[in-house]
Image (tube, rainbow, N blue to C red):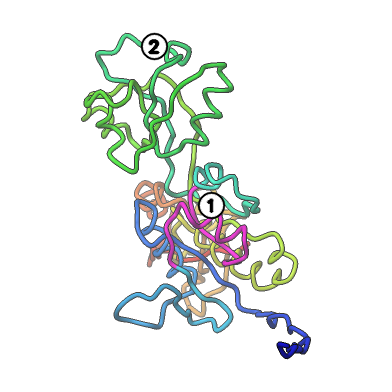
Amino acid sequence: MAKQVKYSKKKTTPAPFSSIVRLAIPNKGRIAAPIMDLIEKSGLHFPEIGERRLITKTLDPQVEILFARPIDIPEYVATGAADLGITGHDMVVERESHVKELLDLQSGKAKLVLAVHEDSSITSVQQLNGMKVATEFPVITKAFFAKHNTSIKVVLVGGACEATPHLGIADAIVDLSSSGTTLKTNRLRIIDEVMETSTHLIANKESLRTKREKIDEIYLALESVIRARGQCYLMMNVKRTSLDAIKHVLPGLSGPTVMDVASNENLVAVHAVVNEERVYSLINSLKRAGAKDILVMAIQRMIR
């Protein structure tokens, strides 16, 4: 008779809670470089050099970076493998991921468009009924055609989507377009716009509850960089008698800041934030109004 073996029941200890916030960002692709620049300007520098690792520490011991494919980031965030992620809005919609979109980073702007060969007689969505459409976005594409009560066959491609009409693989494509140059180069014509997209900061819903303070800190850091884009900081000295003329010329977020200057010339220092597109014309106007010692400085972050 076989000896009965008794197994002791051991209590399993749940994994300890980690206060570290993991931020997933693209490892490559059209939006990768702008995102890296945004991360650096926000203050979350990468102290490590050399070969890039899958998970990299930052100067903040409570924040680490996970490098991943843009299409995978929504699911990493949804499942909790990452607390935050930065990827295209189109990726979030395509993966149908249950995440919270926190912030439009206002970069990587593009349109997902429906296009056909320029010699095609097709001019509307409905004319593609029963035809083949090549795309890297099957979920979005099917939903778009369903909304137009049009039945199509999706041809899934992993790249070079614009070549498929020329090769006879598909009658149309649904693909991203930033400037339209690539479509024109490949003799393709847009017949409809599927959706607009840009880069977004997304969050795991549970992490928003348990790690809110650190997530808010990261959110503020990224938002401050975005707010500073296209803005310059002007500093100048002005005689007090010319101050009203300077205020009339100078725009600002909340009006210029005026401070006394230790000088025998009865000067004041005037500081203001202005749109960098206006700096060229403002300089001459400020000089004529009585400003001198004018400095123009770039702004890296701006917090209201």
> Residue 102, image x and y in percent?
63, 54
Q: Is residue 106 left or right of residue 47?
A: right
166 or 245: nearer the eye?
Answer: 166
Q: Magenta part of the protein: which range?
A: 67-88
Residue 48 percent across, percent down from the top left: 38, 83
- Quadrant placement of the C terminus: bottom right
Residue 259 magenta? no
The residue carrying mark 2 is 123
**Is 69 within the magenta?**
yes
Q: Nearer the viewer, residue 128 or 4?
A: 4
The residue carrying pointer 1 sits among few (fewer than 14), some (14 to 19) or many (20 or more) residues within 10 Å by Cα, namely many
Q: Residue 22's quadrant in the figure?
A: bottom right
Q: Residue at image x 56%, y 42%? A: 93
**Residue assigned mark 1:** 200
Residue 242 appears in the rendering: no
Q: Residue type at mark 2: give it.
A: Thr
68 vs 202, nearest the viewer: 68
Please give left or right for residue 218 compared with residue 181 in the image. Answer: right
